[in-house]
Amino acid sequence: MSRSLALPALPLAALLLLSTLTSAALAQAGQPDPGFSILAQPSGITEPTPDENTPDTSNERYTVIGPHLGRDAYLALRGSENDQVLRTRWQIERSSLDGEPLDGEQREIVIGDGYVTETGTAERVIQDFITARTLTRVPALDGPVMRSAPIVSHVHRQMNTFAYYTEGGTLDSVTGPGGTSFDRFWIEAAMGVRLARADLVSTITEAGTTEVRRTAEGQPVFSHVDDGLGAGQPAALFRGWLQHAVPVHPDALATLTDEAGIPERFSFLVYSPSSPDGRRETWTRLSSHEDEASFPWPEGLEPARADTYQIDDPAIRALLQTGLDAASQPSAAPAAEDFLAAADAAQRRADPSGAYLALYQISHHQGPCGSDTPSPVCNRMSQVTAAGIGNTTFETLMSGISRMQSDRVAALTILREHLHRDGFDGAAANLLAAQALAAVRSSQPETLPDMDLASLFAASASNDPYAPMAFWHGGRYAASQGDVETAWLLFDIARALPASHSLPPSVEAIAMSEQLQTLAPGFFVTTVSPAAQTVTDEETVGSDEN
């Protein structure tokens, strides 16, 4: 079980602010009610249009730190070149509450410039607090690769789990897997999430040991001895790493301060399904020394492909891979002239429906046409519409699109006749159908069972890999199925594609990320300045990589 740091006291409404998944959708997904969801609009945030609350960035090119970046581009955007590290080696002993030894091990934890990692593990994990990402070196058929996931996806998972087992924070006693019952304090410790500050008693013994108890008479749930090693940023980074690595309650872990340094020794109690009778874990620092080491992403180690992430649905896996390929080659993104050329080709085939859909697809790149946003593509849509009057197939298609809100089942019946298309027109038809089907199934999960929603998103992206909205809506779908980890990868892709800054993914993803950081700040190290998430043309690095 994983965890986090000291949180502000949170009202129940704050934890459940974004919860919008219906019971029908959850039943369809076969997942417990997550309790916390990114699917609703955050309070106080309005969905932007291209000219509302959006800076004029028409001459800028954005590069988002995401899973598509290779080593050189990632390090260039990260911006830190300090090779000084602090290596610490620990002896870890686990024992029952009556003192009987259970097991033990040694681990080496390396604290670098803005990151913490552990050596000697098969899947080496790097908590990079500068970029707020978790990098994981994993084996693959052609050799090891590097996964890259935003820390917020892990926080989202922890929030879901906490909300599910505590019924939104309303239960004082929690029943875990296997039917074991625990006081809620222990799932707060395991998940790193709590709604109100725990009433803990902290004392310092004559020997200088800080002991944290739930009651004055109880045994310590957490204790530590400090000697000032790595006071300041290294201590903050180590504590941030602990918040990901050990099940200590956030309020107890908050007694570790940056000024006191990395503890010389610390110990904590654990109650969990694997230790229902409780156990004590004690970490003792055996050695420490300063060293020099480059950031632990070796040269030649490629970013992970979609098949190395834990994604069960093959269509969602294909969607992610399409996005990874597109985001790593931004110069291949289509221009307005490409949509116009596709429409011209369709009109030469006497296919006004194909022409209209090809032009419509540009809205999935840069937002819908409006009276205040004239463009050659939007102007051509009006011409194609006028020319299509009298064509039965075209008029039926327009009728279907007009019913996207009022009668989605009817719209889907019409759109299905266009799902065989390829190119921009096929991309538009499949994404329109996917959005309509997702909306219908949120309340009627058995509707049109022969249609596979994930495949619609994948087909749309396959026909047009550079449309940010395919990955944004695909991510929302993945989240509704309980796969928040993949959802955030797809959100990263949506934001990384050219022109995405004018669409909802840019603003909404940032708003959702900030809200998760507010709810569980201990997973992040705020003393480390975050790397720049965007750069202008003059500063762009790593474009068209891989």
Image (cartoon, rainbow, N blue to C red):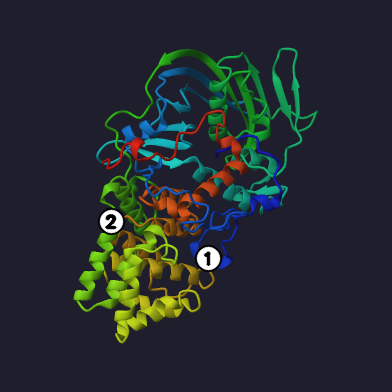
Q: Is residue 193 above or below residue 466?
A: above
Gap in Å between the C-alphas at discs 2 and 1?
Answer: 35 Å
Place of residue 307 in the rendered image (x, y in percent of width and height, measured from the top left)? 33, 48
Tags 2 and 1 touching, CB below 8 Å: no
Res 146 quadrant in image: top left
**Crowd class of label 2 (few under 14; some 14 to 19; many from 20; radius 10 Å):** some
Res 372 quadrant in image: bottom left
Place of residue 48 in the rendered image (x, y in percent of width and height, measured from the top left)? 51, 57
* Between discs 2 and 1, the one toward the N terminus: 1
Which of pointers 2 and 1 indicates the residue nearer the eye?
2
Q: Is residue 61 above or below residue 209?
A: below
For residue 310, side relative to residue 203 (left or right): left
Q: Secondary structure at mark 1?
A: helix
Place of residue 84 in the rendered image (x, y in percent of width and height, measured from the top left)? 43, 17
**Crowd class of label 1 (few under 14; some 14 to 19; many from 20; radius 10 Å):** many
- Residue nearer the viewer, 327 or 322: 327
- Residue nearer the viewer, 489 or 79: 79
The three-letter code of the residue at mark 2 reads Pro
- Residue nearer the viewer, 188 or 332: 332
Could you tell me which quadrant the N terminus lies in? top right
According to the picture, the residue beneath numbered tag 1 turns out to be 25
Residue ID at (43%, 42%): 149
Q: Is residue 317 above or below residue 419?
A: above
- Residue nearer the viewer, 35 or 113: 113
Residue 493 visible, this orientation = yes
The three-letter code of the residue at mark 1 reads Ala
Q: Secondary structure at mark 2?
A: loop
Q: Is residue 50 above or below residue 431?
A: above
Q: How many marks?
A: 2
Place of residue 496 in the rendered image (x, y in percent of width and height, measured from the top left)? 38, 47
